[in-house]
Amino acid sequence: MNESGIVELLPSVNASLNALATVLLALGYWKIKHGRVRGHLNAMLASFAVSVVFLACYLTYHYLAGSRKFAGPPGTGWIYFPILISHVVLAAAVPFLAVWTIYLAWRRRFIAHRQLARWTFPIWMYVSVTGVLVYVMLYWIWPGGGG
């Protein structure tokens, strides 16, 4: 497979990584709510690792291919653009929130970790879910935006 073939696969890879991060985040949340601290730790660190791989793939795709234009019919932008804008704004915060939340746990500052996680988790979850949703809208519902 040549470079352009790999680049064409990256949006699907990115959506898959976002979906996997979503599942791992939900699993980590479930684990901590059921007192399974080790499972929580493993799921959250796995979600972080998947998100780091996602970010590398995402940046690679946009460096090589640019961005894809929204190709929805007139009148559908009111659905797509608020989701995209909120996704992008919150996605910029996730790496900082996630790293700081992990750092607090690593330093065994569990009260501060829990307080920050109350913000980090829903933002990270929203970003993961809306990342998949943006992909679905661009490549499945309204394809044809080009690169």
Image (spheres, rainbow, N blue to C red):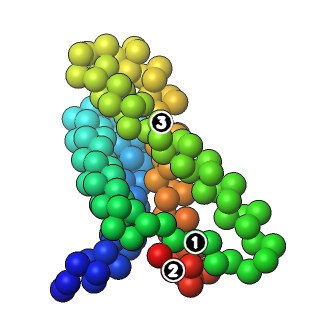
Name the side, left or right, on which 73 lies relative to 28: right
Q: Residue at x 47, y 20 (%)?
A: 115
Label 1 residue SS: loop
- Identity of the residue furthest to the right in this view: 75
Q: Are marks 1 and 2 in contact (CB under 8 Å)?
A: yes
Q: Determine the CA span between mark 2 and mark 3.
A: 28 Å
| Mark earlier in primary sequence (1, 2) | 1
Label 3 residue SS: helix
Label 2 residue SS: loop
Q: Amino acid at mark 1?
A: Lys
Q: Position of residue 116 (x, y in %)?
A: 45, 23
Q: Determine the CA span between mark 3 and mark 1.
A: 24 Å
Q: Which residue is mark 3?
A: 93
Give the image quarter of residue 39: top left
Camera-near label (3 vs 1) is 1
Q: Which residue is mark 2?
A: 146
Q: Position of residue 17 (x, y in %)?
A: 34, 61
